[in-house]
Image: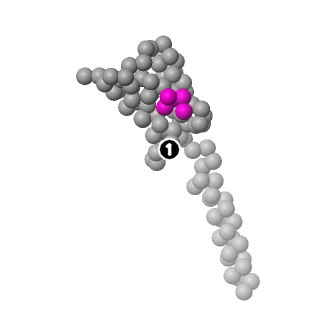
Amino acid sequence: MMRGIVTFAIGASFLGAQAPMQCSRTPDPTLRHEETAGDALYELAQRFRQEGNNAGAKRTLEYLVERYPSSRHHASAEEELRELGKAAPVLSPKP
């Protein structure tokens, strides 16, 4: 019985020492494989811009900046909003 407890304690301490290496607390957001809401919104805004719908792109980017401040696209969205603020809204698709 005592031998089983000692074995368990050694095993548990070994696993506890390895956990920080397995579960990073500061993951690199550029290495994410799953799509986040911020990713989807940024992609949608890019599609709007490609179609010439600057008003839709602007609204989508504003929503992203407001609701997802920790998104990896936050800074890019703010920069694009500055660009879109200078451009006249275009709603017709590009040829």
Closer-to-camera residue (91/58):
91
Mark 1 residue type = Thr
Residue situated furthest left in the rendering:
95
Residue 65 to residue 19: above or below = above
Label 1: few (<14), some (14–19) or many (≥20) C-alpha neighbours in 10 Å:
few
Residue 81 to residue 60: above or below = above
- Based on the picture, tell me whether residue 61 belongs to the magenta stretch: yes
Residue 35 to residue 66: above or below = below
> Where's residue 51, x and y in %?
33, 27
Report the residue at 46% width, 45% height from top: 35
Q: What is the secondary structure assignment of the residue under circle 1?
A: loop
Residue situated furthest front in the rendering:
91
Q: Is 41 on the left-hand or right-hand side of 95?
A: right
Report the residue at 59% width, 53% height from top: 23
Report the residue at 63% width, 47% height from top: 25
> Where's residue 82, x and y in %?
52, 18
Disc 1 designates what residue?
36
> Where's residue 3, x and y in %?
71, 82
Look at the image and give the residue range highlighted in magenta: 59-63
Name the magenta segment's main secondary structure. helix
Can residue 74 be seen at all in this image of the molecule? Answer: no
Closer-to-camera residue (89/81):
89
Can residue 36 be seen at all in this image of the molecule? Answer: yes
Q: Is 61 on the left-hand or right-hand side of 20?
A: left
Q: Quadrant of residue 94?
A: top left
Q: Quadrant of the C terminus?
A: top left
Closer-to-camera residue (85/28):
85
> Where's residue 41, x and y in %?
47, 37
- Based on the picture, tell me whether residue 31 belongs to the magenta stretch: no
Q: Quadrant of residue 69?
A: top right
Residue 9 to residue 29: above or below = below
Q: Quadrant of the N terminus?
A: bottom right
